[in-house]
Amino acid sequence: MALVYPQTLLQFLDIIRDENFEELLVRLKVIKNGNRGRIPFMFIISLPNMDRQITALRMCLLVYYTTKGAEVPKILQLHAALESISRNTLVTASTGFGKTHIMALLMLLEKSTSTRIFITLSPLKRLQVTQVVTFLEKYGISTISINQDTPRDIQYWRKYVHDTRKNATQLSTSRHLIVTAEQLFKSLEGHWTCFSLTLREPQFRKRIAHINVDEVHFVHYAGMERFGLTPFRVAWALFLGSEYGLIRGSINRPTVIYARHCVIGNFDVLENYLCFIRSPFPQNGTAQDQPRVLLFFDSNSLALRVAKFLNAHAPPHLHNKGFSRHYYSTMSPEYLDITHESFNDPNGSCRILCATAGESVGIDHHDVRLTANIGVVDPSDGQQRGGRNDRLQLGGLHITLYEEWAQNVKLDEFENKDLPFASDPDRPRTFLKKGSNKKRRAEDSDSDSSVLQLNTEEDGVTRMDSGDELGSDTVSKSSLGVTGLHENGLQDGCKLSSKSCVRDSARGLSGTDDGLKGWSISRSNDGSNDVDGPGVVGVLKKG
């Protein structure tokens, strides 16, 4: 076969979309050496029929050339995309796994002249912003976000969403619409939204190729009544479905270790947070000498107070330069954009971000290797917050700070068999009410942030059995291991095992010479924490 070299990438990708199996194989051989064997070829040829093999090869080649060789799908990503073509599919995987990549594979199959569209339901505006950038810049897919801030101007909707005029070509409209769930229904004021009205157009519905529901755990955690609390985003409950294929990957993050630490007094004692500033700070050092730290709060006022406190205790030459900033949804959009960009910019002045949930769901932070929950949180929230850590897979640390009361909760209070949610592993002790405090909301579960673990593990150290709770299909039980903080900080060669102690020390990380810089996390076999067999424990080493 003579290879054709068109003038544009779009023409080249359209040729790939039309090629047969033999022609695709030739292209695969051309890129094989430069791809380091990453395309899962053995998986592809093991697929049950030729049509699936052709589609899988196309997906691999399309995303390879679109990303200039930077990406090819993993087996689980390819499997999920193939399954999603013909049936409803639920994919569970760890944060940072690449679920966005799965959506992109499906969209890249469409020819450049196609007018079919893809809809992704997304829960947060900040997440929408990052998703739009990813699809536009990484995959070259025309994408817009739709939420309550989207213009209602008819010309905007004709140009970017759907042109309702007769014989309109739709070629200028966006291929991908990222929509908040509430836009599918009536507004709080009782008016139909622009998008819900567009959905009533028969010609628009015919254009829909695929609907993705991102962060689908919002269906359960935000859309349904839980433990006596009314749902706070009822629109999500309307996406419940009964029949789907389950594609399940591990939610284990093997390069992130998990620790917890009991604060001195309570969270209002601001000296507890000094451990997140590098100490000692290099003389004449710049902001970039401070490792990025992402702290998650449930209280807006506490986030603000901690940010101001850390700013006041930053090196003098970094005062009044946004060294530490607060971030929560009630701030102005302009402030939120500036703060988010300052924290994510490698040369930005913001090095410590005191945030609420708005920065925890689905958002990639380039080089954050230290995250912390300020308080016991819902297991799903804990996974999302810890998932902002170590996106580059260089090794990271996720800490849960808790108050002493959490260790004094009586576990038998969780054993009320008469409660309708008695079988829920994340259950509280009793029904909750709006405004219930943290003690009442404390949950009994197998998450690293749970009260159950705080009261049952030796020496105040967290243990997670990844083979069970994390749904691992690649690592053995207990492989995530157990972690802790040394009383003098993170020290060279400090083994984080069930014999490690978490002391009541506010020093935390400040006892190290240089924060997390220069530290690496390795894994070693160790039988000292055997429960069901040898496990793997995290070890911090310098260099």
Image (cartoon, helix red, strand yellow):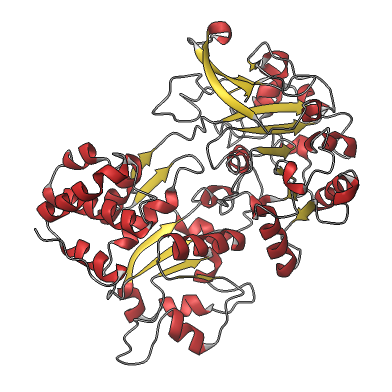
Location of residue 320 in the rendering, given as x and y in whole percent from the top left corner: 87, 56
Q: Residue at x 68, y 64 (%)?
A: 337
Q: Quadrant of the N terminus?
A: bottom left
- The total number of labels drawn is 0
For residue 156, say whether it is visible: yes
Q: Residue at x 69, y 32 (%)?
A: 516
Location of residue 180 in the rendering, given as x and y in whole percent from the top left corner: 54, 65
For residue 269, say whether it is visible: no
- The reply, left or right, for residue 393 in relation to residue 28 is right
Closer to the camera in the image, 114 or 42: 42
Closer to the camera in the image, 284 or 35: 284
- The reply, left or right, for residue 19 in relation to residue 138 is left
Among all residues in the image, which is located at the extreme bottom? 166
When the figure is inspected, residue 127 is found, relative to residue 461, above or below; the finding is below
Closer to the camera in the image, 423 or 61: 61
Location of residue 455 in the rendering, given as x and y in whole percent from the top left corner: 71, 20
Q: Quadrant of the C terminus?
A: top right
- The reply, left or right, for residue 524 in relation to residue 385 is left
Closer to the camera in the image, 357 or 225: 357
